[in-house]
Amino acid sequence: METSLVVRRRVPIKQRLLDRFGKAREIVGPGWRSELARFDPFFNTREGEAYMRSVAQAYSDNKRGHVDRIECVTLALEKVAGIEGRDL
Protein backbone atom coordinates (compact mmCIF):
# COMPACT_ATOMS: atom_id res chain seq x y z
CA MET A 1 0.00 0.00 0.00
CA GLU A 2 1.37 3.35 -1.02
CA THR A 3 1.06 6.34 1.28
CA SER A 4 0.78 9.86 -0.03
CA LEU A 5 3.29 12.27 1.45
CA VAL A 6 1.20 15.22 0.40
CA VAL A 7 -0.98 16.37 3.25
CA ARG A 8 -4.06 18.08 1.97
CA ARG A 9 -4.70 21.38 3.62
CA ARG A 10 -8.23 21.50 4.95
CA VAL A 11 -10.06 24.77 5.16
CA PRO A 12 -11.03 25.44 8.79
CA ILE A 13 -14.73 25.56 9.67
CA LYS A 14 -14.40 29.23 10.60
CA GLN A 15 -13.18 30.11 7.11
CA ARG A 16 -15.85 27.97 5.46
CA LEU A 17 -18.51 29.77 7.49
CA LEU A 18 -17.06 33.16 6.57
CA ASP A 19 -17.11 32.16 2.90
CA ARG A 20 -20.77 31.17 3.22
CA PHE A 21 -21.50 34.42 5.05
CA GLY A 22 -19.91 36.39 2.20
CA LYS A 23 -22.03 34.61 -0.42
CA ALA A 24 -25.24 35.17 1.54
CA ARG A 25 -24.33 38.82 2.15
CA GLU A 26 -23.80 39.32 -1.59
CA ILE A 27 -27.25 37.93 -2.32
CA VAL A 28 -29.01 40.03 0.35
CA GLY A 29 -27.11 43.18 -0.54
CA PRO A 30 -25.75 46.19 1.33
CA GLY A 31 -28.74 46.36 3.69
CA TRP A 32 -28.10 42.86 5.02
CA ARG A 33 -28.12 43.96 8.66
CA SER A 34 -31.53 45.60 8.38
CA GLU A 35 -32.89 42.60 6.51
CA LEU A 36 -31.56 40.23 9.13
CA ALA A 37 -33.04 42.34 11.95
CA ARG A 38 -36.40 42.31 10.16
CA PHE A 39 -36.21 38.55 9.65
CA ASP A 40 -35.20 37.56 13.18
CA PRO A 41 -36.05 39.65 16.28
CA PHE A 42 -32.81 38.54 17.98
CA PHE A 43 -30.82 40.62 15.52
CA ASN A 44 -32.91 43.66 16.43
CA THR A 45 -31.40 43.62 19.94
CA ARG A 46 -28.16 45.02 21.29
CA GLU A 47 -26.70 41.51 21.52
CA GLY A 48 -27.83 40.67 17.98
CA GLU A 49 -26.24 43.84 16.66
CA ALA A 50 -23.01 42.86 18.42
CA TYR A 51 -23.15 39.47 16.70
CA MET A 52 -23.57 41.08 13.28
CA ARG A 53 -20.76 43.58 13.92
CA SER A 54 -18.46 40.79 15.14
CA VAL A 55 -19.08 38.70 12.04
CA ALA A 56 -18.62 41.65 9.69
CA GLN A 57 -15.26 42.35 11.37
CA ALA A 58 -14.29 38.68 11.15
CA TYR A 59 -15.11 38.72 7.44
CA SER A 60 -12.59 41.55 6.99
CA ASP A 61 -10.02 39.98 9.33
CA ASN A 62 -10.52 36.25 9.88
CA LYS A 63 -8.39 36.34 13.04
CA ARG A 64 -11.34 38.06 14.67
CA GLY A 65 -14.76 36.72 15.54
CA HIS A 66 -15.97 33.67 17.37
CA VAL A 67 -17.03 30.66 15.34
CA ASP A 68 -20.33 30.26 17.23
CA ARG A 69 -21.33 33.85 16.45
CA ILE A 70 -20.26 33.41 12.84
CA GLU A 71 -22.39 30.27 12.59
CA CYS A 72 -25.44 31.98 14.13
CA VAL A 73 -25.32 34.96 11.77
CA THR A 74 -24.40 32.89 8.70
CA LEU A 75 -27.26 30.41 9.09
CA ALA A 76 -29.80 33.19 9.65
CA LEU A 77 -28.47 35.23 6.72
CA GLU A 78 -28.60 32.20 4.44
CA LYS A 79 -32.29 31.84 5.27
CA VAL A 80 -32.87 35.52 4.42
CA ALA A 81 -30.97 34.98 1.16
CA GLY A 82 -33.08 31.94 0.31
CA ILE A 83 -30.23 29.49 0.67
CA GLU A 84 -31.94 26.50 2.26
CA GLY A 85 -30.74 23.15 3.50
CA ARG A 86 -27.25 24.14 4.58
CA ASP A 87 -26.17 22.23 7.64
CA LEU A 88 -22.73 22.11 9.15
Image (spheres, helix red, strand yellow):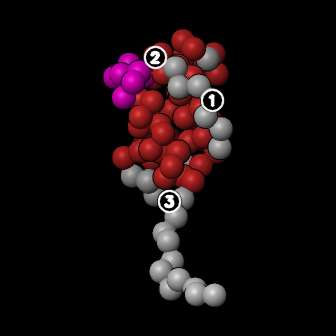
Amino acid found under the numbered disc labelled 2: Ser
User: Is 44 on the left or on the right of 27, as rendered?
Assistant: right
Q: Nearer the viewer, residue 35 or 75?
A: 75
Amino acid found under the numbered disc labelled 1: Gly
- The image's mark for residue 10 is none
Q: Which residue is mark 1?
A: 85
Residue 69: x and y in percent read: 60, 41
- The image's mark for residue 11 is 3
* Number of residues whose C-alpha sits closer than 10 Å to that of mark 1, classed few (under 14), some (14–19) or many (20 or more): few
Q: What secondary structure is marked by label 2? A: helix
Q: Which residues are magenta?
A: 26-32
Q: Nearer the viewer, residue 77 or 63?
A: 77
Q: Nearer the viewer, mark 1 or mark 2?
A: 1
* Number of residues whose C-alpha sits closer than 10 Å to that of mark 3, classed few (under 14), some (14–19) or many (20 or more): few
Q: Nearer the viewer, residue 48 or 20?
A: 20
30 over 13 or under it: above or below: above
Residue 70: x and y in percent read: 56, 42
Amino acid found under the numbered disc labelled 3: Val
